[in-house]
């Protein structure tokens, strides 16, 4: 019943979009890059309708990529629902900053943004009409036509305007959102780039970025953006392999600082630590591994599993970083320091709800 | 069926089954997963079956830990038609040895068997897909004959091509996509295990049974190219 009603609603939206499309077609360039949007059997009928409707609307070139940056990818809230088939979730490393970027420009919170890593790209606006942009996350000295531009606040860009980044100041990952969202290939219901699994690729030079620009208010921002530290304390819920660790191992994990190795990436953060030792070589069966899971290989050096982690793993896990603290890790620079503190599930879920309330209020009332 | 629940961070719970890993437990796990699917609880995002556990991901903004645990006990008490999770038998053609199976000789040598004996033993068994993981569509297959178990390569390969069939310790598996890997590669299947362009993207599901058979290089290539190749798949409906 509900499904039928929603289907009708999407049909109506479809008609509206169809009219819009005819109008837009006169001035929009034919999209050739991403001819198909793939929808899979397992996604519901509703999402099929959505993507059919969206497909009818054509995207346009928003940016020309002058320099791609070191690792610039499309990320949203990830590929949910396919882990049972071994498909990694992927998605934004810092989902808090991503959602704020989307909210500020008036997009769905789950829309795809460009995730920029340490060294930002250099982009030139190619859209015929002005676009609305927001930047959140890491401080990478963003500039609009060589003039510094404020982050965590929407601003307007016109055809020919250039967005570039300078020196690294704080954090690791910045997010670029444009009102109306980006057009990127959809795999299993998500636009997140996951090169290893064959879903998309990172930006390259002389590329174009496509999207569906719409009008949005300028100067919308938040007053207290997060400050990214080089030394963070994060809370961990212990388990599931608590019994495998020695007393000394557990003591070292919670009482000594851990340093982030340079070979940390979107799959995992490798830490240099006082060894977190196992009881002995007890065998464990592979099981599902979550975002924030802390696995300990036999050398005793923890690995925090991040957005691009595999779906399952066979190393013992001492605990899981709580979801509201994951952005702190996502923004922690190489050689940064982490201290872990134990927390109860109840307390952690309270913090997750607090974060959700903040985002909800911002979304509904633009209040913070 | 007895199980214990463990919080995995603030957004997941692990259902840990007390029994040892076995085909029987795997059937129970598949049945349990069907029940979660049927129950369609708002706030439950997805679930991942493994050898002796199922991890359920949920939104703490919709359900707290106590509530999700209550739901899991309720789900477990549900009665659903066992037909919902009937097991399929899938036959997989493999070209063994040569350029497709560079480690067949190594596997034969380390087990004091001939290459033909390795192939015969590998094809004799029926395997069970305990779970998918590691790569999209990668099946963890149980049931390898211990006579052909072989330790991993000392030095993992930078690239193992999609379709490669390997042995590592007492497990055998197939690479769905190109990936670095340390398994002994004994052959290759021309089938696609993971096709992101297709509606039905995955060849395997947890709980499937798998049998291998040997084919020659040329006959299978011809069939696949002409589109005549059909995956043999039998629904026998048996669950017990």
Image (cartoon, rainbow, N blue to C red):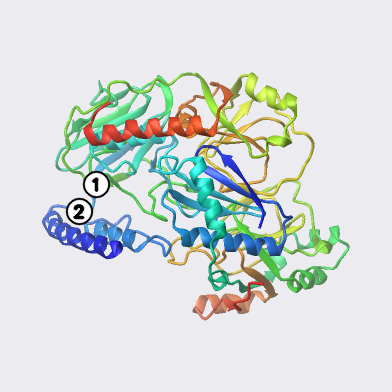
Q: Is residue B146 left or right of residue B184?
A: right
Q: Residue drawn at (19%, 42%), measured in percent from left and top? A: A127
Task: Point out the residue furthest to the bottom here.
Answer: B228
Residue beneath label 2, please? A29
| Cα gap from disc 2 to disc 1, whole angstroms | 8 Å
Q: Is residue A2 left or right of residue A281?
A: left
In this view, the residue in front, A117 or B7, is: B7
- The vertical placement of B207 against A356, above or below, is below
Tell me if mark 1 has few (under 14), some (14-19) or many (20+) residues whose alpha carbon lies within 10 angstroms of its own.
many
In this view, the residue in front, A154 or B36, is: B36
- The vertical placement of A354 against B103, above or below, is above
Q: Residue drawn at (84%, 63%), measured in percent from left and top? A: B147
Residue A61, which numbered label? 1
- 2 and 1 marks in contact (CB < 8 Å): yes
Callout 1: helix, strand or loop? Answer: strand
Q: In x, y percent, where is residue B172?
A: 71, 60
Q: In x, y percent, where is residue A266?
A: 50, 37
In the rendered image, which quarter is residue A218 located in? top left
Q: Which chain does the residue under circle 1 lie in? A: A
Q: In x, y percent, where is residue B45?
A: 45, 50
Look at the image and tell me whether residue A123 can be seen: no
Of marks 2 and 1, which one's residue comes earlier in the chain? Answer: 2
- The vertical placement of A204 against A8, above or below, is above
- The vertical placement of B64 against A218, above or below, is below
Task: Point out the residue furthest to the right here.
Answer: B112
In the rendered image, which quarter is residue A98 located in? top left
In the rendered image, which quarter is residue A150 located in? top left
In this view, the residue in front, A233 or B1, is: B1
Callout 2: helix, strand or loop? Answer: loop
Q: Is residue A222 left or right of residue B47?
A: left
Q: Which chain does the residue under circle 2 lie in? A: A
Specify the quadrant that holds the C terminus of chain B. Answer: bottom right
């Amino acid at each position: 019943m509900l499904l039928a009603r929603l289907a009708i609603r999407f049909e109506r939206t479809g008609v509206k979009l169809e009219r819009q499309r005819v109008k837009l077609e006169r001035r929009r360039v034919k999209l050739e890059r991403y001819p198909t949007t793939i929808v899979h059997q397992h996604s519901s009928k509703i999402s099929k309708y959505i993507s059919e409707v969206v497909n009818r609307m054509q995207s346009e070139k928003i940016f020309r990529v002058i320099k791609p940056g070191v690792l610039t990818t499309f990320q949203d809230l990830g590929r949910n629902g396919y882990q049972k088939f071994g498909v990694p979730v992927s998605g934004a490393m810092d989902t808090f900053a991503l959602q704020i970027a989307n909210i500020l420009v008036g997009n769905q919170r789950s829309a795809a943004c460009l995730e920029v890593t340490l060294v930002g790209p250099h982009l030139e606006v190619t859209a015929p009409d002005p676009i609305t942009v927001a930047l959140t996350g890491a401080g990478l000295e963003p500039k609009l036509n060589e003039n510094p531009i404020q982050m965590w606040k929407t601003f307007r860009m016109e055809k020919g305007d250039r967005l570039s980044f300078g020196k690294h100041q704080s954090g690791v990952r910045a997010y670029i959102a444009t009102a109306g969202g980006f057009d990127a290939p959809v795999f299993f219901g998500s636009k997140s780039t996951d090169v290893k699994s064959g879903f998309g690729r990172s930006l390259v030079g002389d590329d174009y970025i496509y999207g569906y620009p719409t009008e949005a208010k300028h100067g919308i921002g938040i007053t207290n953006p997060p400050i990214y530290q080089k030394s963070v304390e994060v809370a961990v819920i212990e388990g599931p392999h608590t019994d495998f660790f020695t007393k000394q191992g557990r003591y070292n994990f919670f009482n000594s600082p851990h340093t982030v190795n340079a070979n940390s990436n979107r799959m995992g953060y490798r830490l240099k630590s006082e060894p977190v030792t196992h009881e002995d070589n007890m065998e464990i069966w592979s099981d599902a591994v979550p975002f924030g899971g802390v696995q300990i290989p036999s050398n005793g050096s923890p690995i925090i599993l991040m957005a691009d982690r595999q779906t399952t793993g066979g190393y013992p896990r001492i605990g899981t970083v709580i979801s509201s603290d994951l952005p702190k890790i996502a923004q922690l620079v190489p050689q940064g320091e982490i201290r872990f503190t134990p927390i109860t599930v109840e307390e952690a879920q309270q913090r997750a709800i607090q974060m959700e309330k903040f985002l909800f209020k911002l979304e509904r009332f633009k209040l913070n | 069926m007895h199980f214990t629940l463990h919080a995995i961070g603030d957004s997941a719970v692990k259902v840990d089954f007390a029994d040892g890993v076995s085909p029987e437990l795997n059937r129970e796990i598949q049945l349990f997963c069907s029940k979660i699917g049927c129950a369609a609880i708002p706030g439950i995002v997805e679930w991942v079956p493994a050898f002796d556990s199922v991890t359920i991901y949920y939104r703490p903004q919709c359900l707290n830990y106590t509530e999700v645990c209550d739901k899991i006990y309720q789900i477990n008490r549900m009665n659903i038609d066992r037909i919902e999770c009937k097991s399929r038998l899938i036959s997989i053609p493999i070209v063994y040895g040569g350029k497709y199976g560079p480690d067949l000789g190594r596997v034969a040598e380390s087990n004091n068997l001939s290459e033909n004996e390795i192939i015969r033993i590998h094809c004799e068994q029926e395997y069970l897909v305990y779970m998918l993981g590691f790569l999209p569509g990668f099946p963890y297959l149980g049931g390898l004959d211990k006579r052909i178990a072989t330790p991993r390569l000392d030095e993992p390969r930078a690239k193992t091509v999609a379709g490669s069939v390997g042995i590592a310790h007492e497990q055998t598996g197939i690479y769905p996509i190109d990936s670095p890997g340390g398994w002994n590669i004994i052959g290759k299947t021309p089938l696609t295990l993971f096709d992101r362009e297709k509606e039905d993207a995955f060849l395997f599901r947890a709980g499937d049974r798998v049998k291998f058979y040997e084919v020659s290089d040329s006959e299978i290539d011809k069939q696949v190219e002409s589109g005549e190749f059909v995956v043999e798949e039998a629904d026998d409906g048996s669950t017990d």
